[in-house]
Image: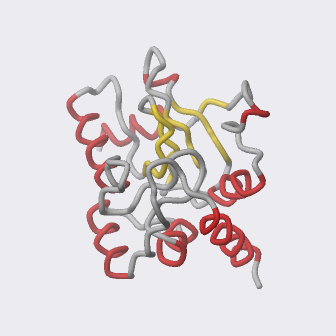
Amino acid sequence: MTEIEQLLTRVADKARNTRPWGWPSLPEPVDSTTLARAEAALGFRLPPLLADLYLSIGDGGFGPEYGLLPLLDNPPAGEPAAVTQYLTNRESAREDPDWPWPEGVLPISHWGCGMYACVDCRNPQSPVLLFEPNADDADQAWYVDAPSLTDWLRAWGEGTGWYMEMNEGMEMAPWADFRIRTTAAQES
């Protein structure tokens, strides 16, 4: 069994045994047609590990805090699906250029107060970023939550994420590529 297969097995076990707020049960996984529709709407492919989570474990409803957002359908808690949230954020960024939303950065989990965990789908490492819109400006709203989706999932499984009570006050590095990625998107 590969390292990723082992991780998926651990995530699936934890997903079956924990339920984030607002999720009465673990949703069924999506099928390949739903994944293809989501990727077509987004205009980019999901990183393989993220696609595997949706295809083999469930359409959201597991993970830290409020859990992964569903891909295309609204969850029981009423939060928009990941694709909807991404498209809304990109449109809002066009209307408010002071708060650009980077292309290819998909919100995957809501933390409350407008904060999201997001995967940079354009980076082969698939880092997980924290969007914290309560900052004074967009340059101070993006942080690196984990260097990869693999690391983010491990932290959830092991209970070592920044959101755990024992890790309160843990510092995150600002996302250095934010301005580069948003400036390049605005120029194209």
Counting from the top left corner in percent of width and height, residue 21 is at 50, 47
- Determine whether, in the image, residue 15 is placed left or right of residue 3: left
Relative image position of residue 136 (x, y in whole percent): 45, 14
Residue at the spot x=73%, y=28% of the render? Answer: 168
Q: Is residue 46 left or right of residue 34?
A: right
Which quarter shows the C terminus?
Answer: top left
Q: Is residue 84 above or below residue 145?
A: below
The one nearer the camera, 20 or 2, is 20
- Tell which residue pokes out farthest to the left in this image: 95
Out of 135 and 43, give the one closest to the viewer: 135
Q: Is residue 51 above or below residue 163?
A: below
Q: Residue 123, how many percent across, how many down?
A: 55, 55
Q: Residue at x 30, y 56 (%)?
A: 74
Query: In the image shown, does 102 or 57 lie closer to the viewer?
Result: 57
- At x 73%, y 33%, the residue is 165
Q: Is residue 105 visible?
A: no
| Visual colour scheme | secondary structure
Taking depth in this image into account, of 89 and 64 the one nearest to the observer is 64
| Residue 57 can be seen, yes or no | yes
- In this picture, residue 78 sits left or right of residue 123: left
Q: Position of residue 3 (x, y in %)?
A: 76, 74
Picture quadrant where residue 175 is located: top right
Numbered-mark total: 0
Residue at the bottom extreme, as displayed: 1
Q: Is residue 67 above or below residue 90?
A: below
Look at 68% across and 49% down and name the residue there.
Answer: 147
Residue extending furthest top?
A: 136
Vertically, is 42 above or below 55? above
